[in-house]
Image: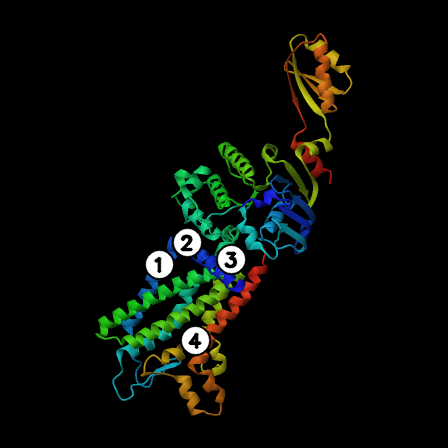
Amino acid sequence: MTDAAHHDTPAIVTDGFTKRFGSLTAVKELNMTVPAGSVYGLLGPNGAGKSTTIDALVGLVHPTEGAVRVLGLDVRTSPVEIRRRTGILPDGFTPYERLTGREHLDAAACANGVAVDTDEALARVGLADAADRTAGGYSHGMSQRLGLAMALVGAPDLLVLDEPAAGLDPHGIKLLRRIIREEHARGATVLLSTHQLAQVEAVCDTVGIIDDGQLVAEDSVETLRRTVGTETTLRIRPAGSLDRARDLLRDLDGVAGVTAEGGMLVVRCDAEQEAADVIAELERSDVTLESYEKSLPGLEQVFEAYTDER
Amino acid sequence: MTGRSSLRRLAAQTGCVARQELLWLRRGWTVPAVTVLFALAVVSVVRRADPPSSGEQPLTLLALVPNGDPLSPTAVVLFTLARVLTLLLPLVTVVLAAGALAGDVESGRLRTLQTFPVSRRAVVGGKLLARSVVVGSVVALGLLAGALVSWLRFGTVDPVSYGLFLLISVGFSLSLTGITVAVSTLTTARSRAIALSLGPLLGCAFFGVDPGVPTVLRTGLLVQPYQLLVAGTHSQIVAIPRVVSTGFPQAPIDGLVLSDGISLCALCAWPVVLLGLSASRYRRRDL
């Protein structure tokens, strides 16, 4: 397992993938590459085509045009082999309400042809106490955890998680992040589709933004941040007079604006480098800094920039 | 070699799906409820089973012939049950099998199942296998209850005749199960699957015994093949179309159509063809 991570074959390649449902084009000529061993975040507004793309990767929907290759296999000819090597948590995961958590894992293990320690697998997602309860009594978050446990059966080479944080409480989200990191460390590739940008920022090394069925951006989070503008915000708490510090800051190059907010100065800088220069300048001046913090443009701004402009 | 290993894989996947399906069915109330109701219906029919009065020929393909001996109670029971089961078995089958795939599509469970490394053929096959086991068991249990009541009432049951009748009836119900699962595979809601399978099956039950429908056409309506096979289970039961055909030799094709071999083929042909078509369509469907 996880041999995909050790060679150059990308985990996922879509080449001109198009999916139409009647007259509606859900995905249009999508070219996406997910490198093996990466944690790839697929972002996009509702109806952008994320779930359709994910469904096509695992053979739940069939491409209208174009090619989809997963772990080097064509999804048209080898959907079962792809699913054998892929752990999938589909959007809106629905458990069998009359079956227990343990029976769900047994079913997944049977289909994968592997043995699984159900106690350990359920404990890993925090469902140890609910192992022998029927899934009909599970909350939404518990069902998601169960779906995640099923996706992890057989230590897959690729983990495809569609909105995995839906219904999870903060503990569940923390657990999800931990599991993604553990799976990544094991060598698995992770494809994560989510609306929670913090989730993507926390775990993904590459991000693809999809809008109107087309990939509008694909790069590392850092690079994407730089491409949409680099305005950086400094929140400065001077030890002495606020007015003195404000006057000094207004005269500096690269400062777009300064406002006072509850004993602090909020300084908007044109670029991250200029924010560093501002701090250096202040430290050289007679203004003493009690504290300061820098905030870079968030993924939210990146997301908005790419999905609003179109 | 490759063919054999892929067959083995398909069998393993089918087994996994069937096991999960059986577990699911075992946990519900439908199977026990239908088992009890069907057994009660069979018991009630057996308790009231009487030979038709002299000269009376009810709308059926079967007739009782004493052959100079008194009518055997087993012949009377089989004659009565065979007529009632043409209506009861479609009902039992549809209730137990219509939700096979359509119910899972409706609830979203089918997507969960298809995230497993199992082919779509294995999903249809596994569901068919599980539902066939359940329907076959329910029918067998009900008819065994009928045999018990028959023995209590008449003090005797011809085990060979009744056993053959039970096998043929289970076979008929499996044929209906195949058709119902095929319809369920083609639809996306349980209610639609029930309507689209129960309607035609009940249509078959009525038109299949209508003397106005040509014998050749009736072969395709499933009831005639079933009752022709039932006629072979006891020497005092005869199939009316066979008698009629013998009296009118100008329709030589009837002899072939009314044979046990063609009857068996007719019972198998519908589910095989429909399942083939529906599985092929299901493979191309977006979930």
Q: Earlier in the sequence, mark 3 or mark 1?
A: 1
Residue occupied by mark 3 = B189
Disc 1: which chain?
A: B
Image-quadrant location for residue B19: bottom left
Alpha-carbon span between mark 1 and mark 2: 15 Å
Q: Give the amino acid at mark 2.
A: Trp
Numbered tag placed on residue B223 in the rendering: 4
Numbered tag placed on residue B24 in the rendering: 2
Horizontal arrangement in the rendering, residue A279 relative to residue B62 (left or right): right
Residue B118 % position (x, y) = 51, 55
The residue sitting at 34% across, 75% down in the picture is B164
Disc 2: which chain?
A: B
Alpha-carbon span between mark 3 and mark 1: 22 Å
Q: Earlier in the sequence, mark 4 or mark 3?
A: 3
Q: Give the amino acid at mark 1.
A: Ala
Q: Is residue A168 above or below residue A24?
A: above
Q: Give the amino acid at mark 4.
A: Val
Residue A132 % position (x, y) = 38, 44
Labels 2 and 3 in the same subunit? yes
Label 3: state its secondary structure: loop
Alpha-carbon span between mark 1 and mark 4: 26 Å
Disc 4: which chain?
A: B
Disc 3: which chain?
A: B
Alpha-carbon span between mark 2 and mark 4: 31 Å
Judge by depth and name the residue closer to the eye, B14 or A135. Answer: B14
Residue occupied by mark 1 = B33
Label 2: state its secondary structure: helix
